[in-house]
Image (cartoon, rainbow, N blue to C red):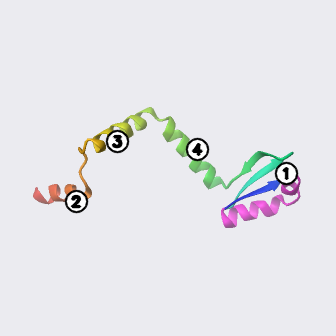
Amino acid sequence: MSKTIDAADARVHFGQLLDEIREKDSTFFVKRRGKVAAVIISPEDYVDLVDINAEIADAELQSALETSKKEHELGEVGTEEDIFKLLRAE
């Protein structure tokens, strides 16, 4: 769940924010002078974001995904059922 909080309130209730992030998997957008200045997220969410960014930056993975997409569009990719039929035929 995402919430927005003013920076002054975040400072006063920082311990409570940390508890809520840990216990309820909350995310806080911290506003300063009416604009979002920071986001406070759980360590797990941060690691997920880092992993996603690494995957996006991985040229080899992106190339494999593009190849798979083209194969799917051309109908060259079988279904799970097709694979099981091939395996049973052996």
Depth check: 25 or 76 in front?
76
- Real-space Cα separation, disc 4 to disc 1, in angstroms: 25 Å
- Real-space Cα separation, disc 2 to disc 1, in angstroms: 55 Å
Residue at 38% in and 40% down = 65
The amino acid sitting under disc 3 is Lys
Q: Is residue 57 above or below residue 43?
A: above
Report whether 68 appears left or right of 88.
Answer: right
Task: Name the residue beneath numbered marker 1.
Answer: 7
Marker disc for residue 81: 2
- Real-space Cα separation, disc 3 to disc 1, in angstroms: 45 Å
Report whether 21 appears left or right of 72.
Answer: right
Q: In this view, does 62 lie above or below 79?
A: above
Query: Mark 1: few, some, or many residues within 10 Å (few <14, many ≥20)?
Result: some
Task: Name the residue beneath numbered marker 4.
Answer: 50
Foreground mark, 3 or 1, reads: 3
Which badge, 3 or 1, is on the more N-terminal residue?
1
Q: Is residue 11 magenta?
A: yes
Query: In the picture, which quadrant includes the C terminus?
Result: bottom left
Q: Does the magenta stretch include residue 34?
A: no
Q: Is mark 3 on a helix, strand or loop?
A: helix
Query: In the picture, which quadrant includes the N terminus?
Result: bottom right
The amino acid sitting under disc 4 is Val
